[in-house]
Image (cartoon, helix red, strand yellow):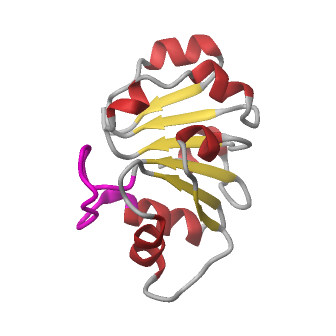
Amino acid sequence: NIESAHINTVAYKRIAVHGFAFKKDTNDTRESAAINVVRDLLSEHANVVVYDPKVPAGEIVTDVLGKGQVNPRLTVATSAYEAAQGAHAIAIVTEWDEFKKLDYAKILAGMQKPAFLFDGRNIVDLAKLRELGFRAHGIGR
């Protein structure tokens, strides 16, 4: 739970969701955990920015909100860096290889402080991220 990890509230905070497909190397979103993660964040009034390298933006919006629906607090980014720019937290929801290789120092520089990172897929080195200055947490470890 993102709120229980000292972020207090996600209301009106920018949360970057990295990954939307149910697993890496696919654009399949059926039963993706990201759908409920994003819905829960929106229900708490967070501003959610989703990035997935394969899932089309329209599909992300439809999966979360329903066909033809819009919510100004949900946007889709074209890169992980764009999603994280100005964010208070990042939630890694799909284990895309590119998320292992990101320049997290660059990402941290563009985030609100304190900057949180929640790794739901056990793909990043939390100790290294903490050394950089993130408040990094593994989910489900």
The residue drawn where x is 68% and y is 44% is: 87
Q: Nearer the viewer, residue 134 or 78?
A: 78
Residue at the farthest bottom position:
68
Q: What's the residue at 67%, 48% (across, down)?
A: 8
Name above or below for residue 112 compared with residue 12.
above
Residue 71 falls within the magenta-colored stretch? no
Q: Residue at x 54, y 34 (%)?
A: 117
> Relative to the observer, which residue lies in front, 131 or 1?
131
Q: Residue at 39% of width from left, 31% of height from top?
A: 98
Q: Position of residue 72 (x, y in %)?
A: 68, 74
Compared to residue 101, the image places residue 83 above or below, namely: below
Q: How many marks?
A: 0
Residue 39 placement (x, y as % from top left) = 48, 69
Q: Quadrant of the C terminus?
A: top left
Quadrant of residue 103 within the rendered picture: top right
Q: Along the line of sight, which residue is nearer the eye, 57 or 9?
A: 57
The spot of residue 129 in percent (x, y) is 53, 18
Q: Which residues are magenta?
A: 20-34
Residue 9 pos. (x, y %): 67, 54
Of residues 119 and 3, the one drawn nearer to the viewer in this rendering: 119
| The quadrant where residue 126 appears | top left
Per the image, is 30 magenta? yes
Vertical order, 57 against 93 (above or below): below
Question: In the rendered view, does 25 fall on the left or right side of 53?
Answer: left
Main secondary structure type of the part rendered in magenta: loop
